[in-house]
Amino acid sequence: MKSFSDVLKAHEAKSQVYCPMCTHTVEAMVTFSGKLAKVTPGQKCAHCGSSIDAGFVFRYDRAA
Ligand SMILES: [Zn+2]
């Protein structure tokens, strides 16, 4: 049984993130918050250098 604080506590992991600018999938840090996984803000695409804040998580660790 998860407590409310556990749900709120986000953690990060390296995942594959889709870059909408260059349509490549790059490795980036992803923040997990409950069932949601989203790109940790402030990162840049390793391929084109664009911000990938708007990208989406392509794949994330099953154990998360
Ligand atoms: Zn890119």
Image (cartoon, rainbow, N blue to C red):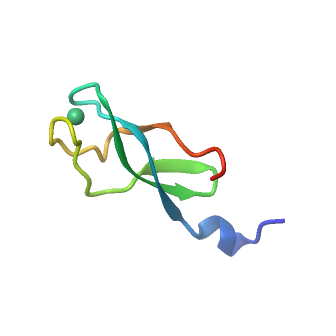
Residue 60 point in image, percent of width and height:
54, 43
Total labels: the figure holds: 0
Q: Is residue 3 above or below residue 16?
A: below
In the picture, measured across the screen, residue 11 lies left or right of residue 7, that is left
Front in this rendered view, residue 35 or 15: 15
**Quadrant assignment, res 2:** bottom right
Residue 57 point in image, percent of width and height:
45, 39
In the picture, measured across the screen, residue 27 lies left or right of residue 50, that is right
Rendered-image quarter of ligand 1:
top left
Residue sitting at the far right: 1
At x 71%, y 71%, the residue is 4
Residue sitting at the far left: 49
Q: Is residue 10 above or below residue 58?
A: below
At x 20%, y 36%, the residue is 47
In the picture, measured across the screen, residue 50 lies left or right of residue 26, that is left
**Quadrant assignment, res 1:** bottom right
Residue 52 point in image, percent of width and height:
28, 43
Q: Is residue 61 above or below residue 31?
A: above
Residue sitting at the far bottom: 5
At x 21%, y 45%, the residue is 51
